[in-house]
Image: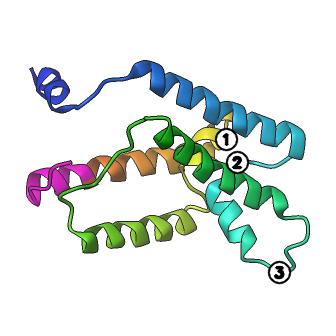
Amino acid sequence: MLAGAMLARMTAFTPLNALLGGLLIGLASLLLLWLNGRIAGVTGMLTGLQRLPLQGQAWRFLFLLGLVAGSAAYALAGGSTPQRQGFPPLLLVLAGLLTGYGTALANGCTSGHGVCGLARFSLRSLAATATFLLVAIATTFVARHLLGLQP
């Protein structure tokens, strides 16, 4: 019964899009490792761009630009993008800051730990990914059931 109520609230169930997206993320991560010897952790890429000198860092910039360009191309092609309507802007800013703090604390984000770290059988990445998921579940519970916010 709970699963049926949750599915009724979902606006669209698109398993093929999710599968294709996951395959593309995996392929991009694999190609970056094979061709450049680098792990596709977005947090590491962003912090790496803040270091000087910037020589030899074009790959970071291009990978991050590809993330933005790919999202823009998808939206321009008619793909739907998630919106956070109804959430207070201050709460979204706070969520972004807490996410940044958490990724710094965990020495990586979900792309680095969840995609690349788990693929390398890293126990640290397993612990980080489990923590990410548990905190996300708790945050969703608080936002929806205690604060009354809906997606």
* 107 relative to 34 in the view: left or right: left
* On-image quarter of the N terminus: top left
Does the stretch in magenta take in 148? yes
Question: Closer to the N terminus: mark 1 or mark 2?
Answer: 2
Q: Nearer the viewer, residue 104 or 94?
A: 94
Which mark, residue 40? Answer: 2
The picture quadrant where one finds residue 62 is bottom right
Q: Amino acid at mark 3?
A: Leu
Does the stretch in magenta take in 73? no
* 89 relative to 103 in the view: left or right: left
Give the residue number, with chain letter if any, for mark 3.
Answer: 52
Are the residues tagged 3 and 2 within 8 Å (C-beta)? no
Q: Where 102 falls versus 124 (above or below)?
A: below
Question: Within 10 Å of the Cα at label 1, are there few (<14), some (14-19), or many (20+) other Cα atoms?
Answer: many
Q: CA distance from mark 3 to mark 2?
A: 20 Å
Give the residue number, with chain letter if any, for mark 1.
Answer: 116
Q: Where 130 falls versus 96 (above or below)?
A: above
Question: Closer to the N terminus: mark 1 or mark 3?
Answer: 3
The stretch in magenta equals 140-151
Q: Amino acid at mark 1?
A: Cys
